[in-house]
Image (cartoon, helix red, strand yellow):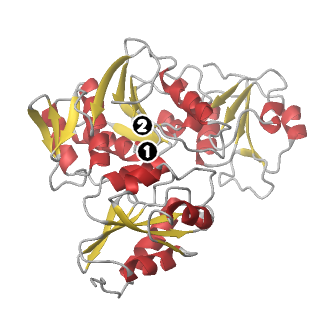
Amino acid sequence: MNLLHKKVAVLGCGRSGIAAARLAAANGAAHVCIFDSDPDAVCPESTLNFVPGAGEKEARNFAADLVVISPGIEANTPWSLAFTCAGAPIIGEVELAFRYFHGRVIAITGTNGKTTTTSLIEHILISAGKTAKACGNYGYPFSEVAQADPQPEFAVLEISSFQLETIASFKPEVAVWLNFAPDHMDRYKTVEDYYRAKLRIFENMTRDQLAIIRVGERLPAIKPRVVEFSAFKGSGVLRFEDNCIMQLANVVADLNGSALQQAHNAENAMAAILACRAVGLSDEQIVPSLLDFEPPHHRCEFVAEKGGVLWLNDSKSTNLHSTEAAIRSQTRPVILIIGGKDKGLDYTPLLSLMRGRVRLCVVFGQIAEQLERTFKGEFPTLRVETVPQAVNAAAEHTRTGDVVLFSPGTSSFDQFTSYAERGQCFCDAVKNLTISPNNN
């Protein structure tokens, strides 16, 4: 990509926007400027040209040759399109970085499990003596990795639907499709729109590349070669039985005692094994790294066991599919704490899965009233306002042998700045508990 003498507009002054601006400038762009529509936005890099509170007038006046858009900004709004008045194409930060990265790319998408799988693949590669960076929607912006000197051998790229909307030539060597379920209905008009954005991960791939896909996913015919895995069905190259990852009759990895032994994490592990095999690693290099891996926080994370009651923090659950996976993985009676921001999701599909598993629901946050209406005819349901209140309400109803599962099933932005802040609030409330289980 030749940026010499080009004017580049970067939309959004977050970390990915700053990284994209630096990358463009380092590769010869004559004038790079970051624009943000928020008049209160602050760019932490004083050396970069930055325009806060930019409107369509500023966009047209800049007359960009290339527009690089951050994933949180939609490309089809009048504001974004105003930057294309001189005929400039719009690409995303991931697409820009891909054009300057010379290593091998493993890309991971899916509604849930992306971060754990991305982190696990990075861990396996590094343990095997390779250089690798987790990047994209997790870890570093891809544009930072593309600027490294030397670049790592592997970019392990967590890629979201937002980032896939603005690719053009992006083509990973290995693409992992973990799962698909409705999400981001505050961004997309229909589930089909969200699905089509996700599918773009395969758009430029050929038979020379590999797609790793969970059994049962509804996918059209795609060009790359396909290999499958499954935690719940008997087909696939790898499957999960009795806490072991199996290939035919052979045990590939015994996950007992590891942080990956629950079914949803076993799926992430199977995808990671297949991805690392695809780039030349042996099972002897891969399996020891599975067993010492610690998943990122807030993903069915152990918090405490008090009075025989297990407390799990799954604050990263920001959609129904993630909560479904967390519930399905439990073998003990569940007290479910669920709630948060209203994203326009329908929670009735959870009911059939919850029967026989969940004995009490505690609902909180902006969506609490809707959740109470959905659940109260099927399960005892308590409605509270905040996460600490939910923890106390759950504790008052625990019995020895229960698991209290904090799996909100929606985003945190009604009361928190992030799922991590929400998860920490839950952990702090659990650690401060003095209530004993009620076994009456």
Residue 158 versus residue 169 in the image, above or below: below
Q: Which of 211 and 281 lies nearest the eye of the viewer? A: 211
Q: Which mark is residue 432?
A: none
Q: Percent x, y for residue 248?
A: 13, 28
Which residue is identified by label 1?
112
Which residue is identified by label 2?
179
Residue 265 versus residue 314 in the image, above or below: above
Q: Which of 127 and 274 lies nearest the eye of the viewer? A: 274
Q: Percent x, y for residue 354?
A: 39, 56
SS under mark 1: loop
Q: Percent x, y for residue 267?
A: 30, 41
- Quarter of the rendering occupied by the N terminus: top right
How packed is label 1: few (under 14 Cα within 10 Å), some, or many (20 or more)?
Answer: many
Identity of the amino acid at label 1?
Answer: Asn
Q: Residue furthest front?
A: 377
Q: Residue furthest bottom?
A: 434
Tell me what residue is drawn at x 47 percent, y 19 percent: 220
- Contact, CB < 8 Å: mark 1 with mark 2? yes
Q: In the image, is 353 to the left or to the right of 306?
A: right
Tell me what residue is drawn at x 41 percent, y 46 percent: 115
Mark 1 or 2, nearer chain start? 1
Identity of the amino acid at label 2?
Answer: Asn
Tell me what residue is drawn at x 15 percent, y 52 percent: 256
SS under mark 2: loop
